[in-house]
Image (cartoon, rainbow, N blue to C red):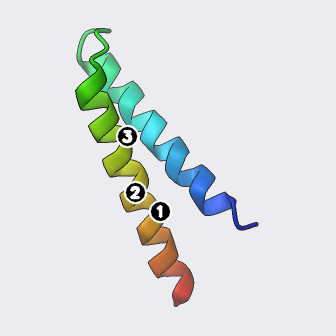
Amino acid sequence: MKRKPFFYAVLAGILAVLIVFLLNGFVFEWAPSIGIFLGIALSQYYVQQILNKK
């Protein structure tokens, strides 16, 4: 069960990149996509860790 928060964080990052891809007119750019993925995934992961402590 330790992998579940990590899986959800990665899934949230992938969905964020997909939404940006769709809004950008189906043009994929590496640098913004990597930044968005890492930002969303890390924030999701740490928020889940904080909420699980309560």
Q: Which residue is mark 2?
A: 42
Which residue is located at x 54 percent, y 43 percent?
11
Q: Residue furthest right?
A: 1
Q: Secondary structure at mark 1?
A: helix
Q: CA distance from mark 2 to mark 3?
A: 8 Å
Quadrant where the N terminus sits is bottom right
Q: Amino acid at mark 1?
A: Tyr
- Give residue 45's mark: 1
Which residue is located at x 36 percent, y 28 percent?
19
Badge 3 crowding class, 10 Å Cα cut-off, few under 14, some 14 to 19, many 20 or more, is many
Which residue is located at x 36 percent, y 60 percent?
43
Q: Amino acid at mark 2?
A: Leu
Q: Secondary structure at mark 2?
A: helix
Q: Is residue 19 above or below residue 22?
A: below
- Give residue 24's mark: none
Along the polypeptide, which appears first: circle 2 or circle 3?
3
Q: Residue furthest top?
A: 26
Left or right: 2 with respect to 24? right
Q: Which residue is mark 3?
A: 37
Q: CA distance from mark 3 to mark 1?
A: 12 Å
Left or right: 27 with respect to 15? left
Along the polypeptide, which appears first: circle 3 or circle 1?
3
Residue 35: quadrant of the picture: top left
Residue 18: quadrant of the picture: top left
Q: CA distance from mark 2 to mark 1?
A: 5 Å
Query: Of 18 and 32, which appears nearest the observer?
Result: 32
Q: Amino acid at mark 3?
A: Phe
- Residue 27 screen position, x and y as percent: 28, 9
Q: How many marks?
A: 3
Q: Are marks 2 and 1 in contact (CB under 8 Å)?
A: yes
Q: Are marks 3 and 1 in contact (CB under 8 Å)?
A: no
